[in-house]
Image (spheres, grey):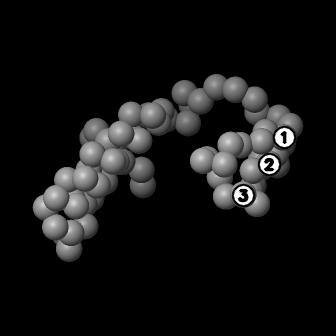
Amino acid sequence: MSSSPQHPAPTPSDLSGAVAEDLALYREKFRRRLTESLDELRGQTQGVVELPLHMAWPDDLDIDGSNPD
């Protein structure tokens, strides 16, 4: 399950306070970049899309929108 303001992701209890706080800030930074629902996504749905390196593993850069997997 993804985190959201209503359902925040749990913070591991074995982390020190400073590390847990850094992790919470990091999660919040990326949570704001995401849509609340997949229905909000827009863009190409067919054909091949090449993702930048920071979004995918190097051997998975080409995503085929026509492939249901």
The kind of residue on which mark 3 rests is Pro
Q: Position of residue 48 (x, y in %)?
A: 84, 40
Q: Quadrant of residue 38?
A: top right
Q: Residue at x 47, y 36 (%)?
A: 34
Q: Is residue 62 left or right of residue 5?
A: right
Q: Position of residue 22 (x, y in %)?
A: 25, 53
Q: Residue at x 72, y 57 (%)?
A: 58
Q: Is residue 1 left or right of residue 15?
A: right
Residue at the disc numbered 1: 48
The kind of residue on which mark 1 rests is Val
**Image marks 2 and 1: residues in contact by CB distance under 8 Å:** yes
Q: Under tag 1, what secondary structure?
A: strand
Q: CA distance from mark 2 to mark 1?
A: 6 Å
**Image marks 3 and 2: residues in contact by CB distance under 8 Å:** no
Which tag, 2 or 1, sits closer to the chain's start? Answer: 1
Q: Quadrant of the C terminus?
A: bottom right
The kind of residue on which mark 2 rests is Asp
Q: Under tag 3, what secondary structure?
A: helix
Q: Residue at x 34, y 48 (%)?
A: 27
Residue 15, above or below 61: below
Q: Residue at x 22, y 61 (%)?
A: 19
Q: Is residue 16 left or right of residue 1?
A: left
Residue at the disc numbered 2: 62
Q: Quadrant of residue 4?
A: top left
Q: Residues within 10 Å of mark 2 (few under 14, many from 20)?
A: some
Residue at the disc numbered 3: 58
The label on residue 1 is none
Which tag, 1 or 3, sits closer to the chain's start? Answer: 1
